[in-house]
Image (cartoon, coloured by chain):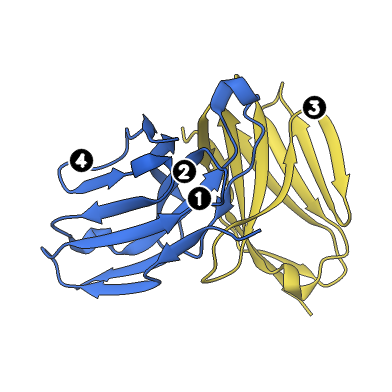
């Protein structure tokens, strides 16, 4: 079974530039997550999709971050304009989880991540 | 109070010893509890999950859950240098999962 794919693996941009990340989840996984992980911290959820609907985007800085999951499969996360504090690893994960209806017992599978450096 | 708390460490243990990692959580309605291992520069990978009070064993790993006291722990027996990593506790209720900041474990050869 193929894992979660992400690209690019590394990206260096200057502040105020824009950047986009792509994620292809494990086939059949209904739920897709984007996390931001700053060095020394745990993953922080930015947005969670179930199929192509947003379940939780409460921690997404909507003035500069956007995400979409067209057709309930691939997803893109965009930052525009980037700030220095956006330097982090952006992790995509997927899960069979359907929330309460599946008992919430499914683990997440993470992609390799994209390391973003904003200079 | 953080929703999921872990001691950041580093926790240093000699090879062959038992490493004990702890996690406390604030939401009494939490249903599922996961331990992920994250090597430096890599993404998290699942080690164990537990839903019911008590112990769950898988090889050298044992997860312990006490819902009344709102803590979950991970024991690693016969620790190996390859176990050196950050261990993330994740707590789930419904569709919402919250990760702790992780505990760094260092196993000395």
User: Which chain is rendered blue in the image?
Assistant: A
Furthest-left residue in this view: A16
Q: Choose top left, top right, bottom left or bottom right for residue B57.
A: top right
Furthest-front residue in this view: A71
Q: Determine the CA span between mark 4 and mark 3.
A: 39 Å
Q: Do marks 1 and 4 both belong to one polypeptide chain? A: yes
Q: Determine the CA span between mark 1 and mark 2.
A: 6 Å
Q: To which residue does mark 2 refer?
A: A32
Looking at the image, is mark 1 or mark 2 earlier in the sequence? Answer: 2
Q: Residues within 10 Å of mark 4 (few under 14, many from 20)?
A: few
Q: Determine the CA span between mark 2 and mark 3.
A: 29 Å
Whether residue B4 appears in this view of the structure is yes
Q: Is residue A62 left or right of residue B84?
A: left
Looking at the image, do the residues carrying marks 1 and 4 touch, with CB atoms under 8 Å apart?
A: no
Question: Camera-side residue: A97 or B62?
Answer: A97
Where A82 sits versus A27, above or below?
below
Q: Residue at x 20, y 64 (%)?
A: A84
Return the x and y of residue B77 as percentages of the image width and height: 87, 58
User: Which chain is rendered yellow in the image?
Assistant: B
Where A116 sits versus A27, above or below?
below
Q: Choose top left, top right, bottom left or bottom right for residue A89.
A: bottom left
Looking at the image, is mark 1 or mark 4 earlier in the sequence? Answer: 4
Q: Residue at x 85, y 40 (%)?
A: B56
């Amino acid at each position: 079974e193929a894992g979660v794919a992400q690209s690019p693996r590394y990206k260096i941009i200057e502040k105020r530039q824009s950047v986009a990340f792509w994620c292809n989840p494990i086939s059949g996984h209904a739920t897709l997550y984007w996390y931001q992980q700053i060095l020394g911290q745990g993953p922080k959820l930015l947005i969670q999709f179930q199929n192509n609907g947003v379940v939780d985007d409460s921690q997404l800085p909507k003035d500069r971050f956007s995400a979409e999951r067209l057709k309930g499969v691939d997803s893109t996360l965009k930052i525009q304009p980037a700030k220095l504090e956006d330097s982090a690893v952006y992790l995509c994960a997927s899960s069979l989880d359907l929330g309460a209806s599946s008992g919430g017992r499914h683990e997440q599978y993470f992609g390799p991540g994209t390391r973003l450096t904003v200079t | 109070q953080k929703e999921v708390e872990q001691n950041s460490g580093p926790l240093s243990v000699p090879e062959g010893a038992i490493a004990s990692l702890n996690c406390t959580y604030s939401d009494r309605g939490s249903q599922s509890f996961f331990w992920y291992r994250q090597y430096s520069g890599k993404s998290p990978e699942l080690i164990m999950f537990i839903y019911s009070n008590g112990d769950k064993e898988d090889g050298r790993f044992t997860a312990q859950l006490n819902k009344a006291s709102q803590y979950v722990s991970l024991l690693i027996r016969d620790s190996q240098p390859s176990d050196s990593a950050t261990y993330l506790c994740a707590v789930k209720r419904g569709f919402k999962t919250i990760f702790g900041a992780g505990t760094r474990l260092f196993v000395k050869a």
